[in-house]
Image (cartoon, rainbow, N blue to C red):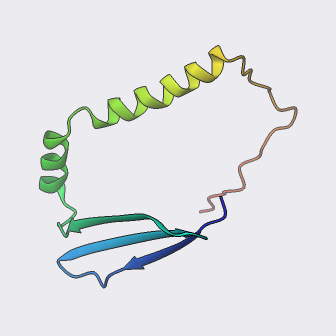
Amino acid sequence: MDCQYFFKILKPGDKLSVIIDQYDKDGKILFASQDGVRNDLNSTQLIKSYLKHPFMTLKIISAIHFEAFKLWLKGLRLVKKKFNIKNNLTFEN
């Protein structure tokens, strides 16, 4: 798609707004926005969030596995790499 995207992030305060406009050669084809309200990141807010959306993690994991299953049904096969990736993070005392 030959499109241009314009992102606007309004200055955060008690609210946060993100706006995305997408244009092609004929004009604007997408306008998307998302607004959020500031909350403190603490245990109480995390528990409230979990209680409002208790199965969100399960839903996301299920959706990922469902898409992987569909790819497997289409014949996608995993290919094991022949090299090992070494962890370059070291912790020294």
Question: Position of 91 compared to 31: left or right?
Answer: right
Give the vertical position of 44 relative to 76 (above or below).
Answer: below
Instruction: Identify the residue shown where x is 15% and y is 46%.
Output: 47
Question: Position of 7 compared to 26: left or right?
Answer: left
Residue 3 image offset from top left, x and y in percent: 61, 66
Instruction: Identify the residue shown where x is 72% and y is 22%.
Output: 76
**In the rendered picture of this protein, how many numbered marks are placed on residues?**
0
Choose between 34 and 11: the one closer to the eye.
34
Q: Residue furthest bottom?
A: 11
Question: Position of 67 compared to 63: left or right?
Answer: right
Instruction: Identify the residue shown where x is 15% and y is 55%.
Output: 45
Residue 26 found in image quarter: bottom right
Quarter of the image where the N terminus is located: bottom right
Give the vertical position of 10 relative to 82 (above or below).
Answer: below
Quarter of the image where the C terminus is located: bottom right
Residue 59 image offset from top left, x and y in percent: 34, 31
Choose between 89 and 47: the one closer to the eye.
47
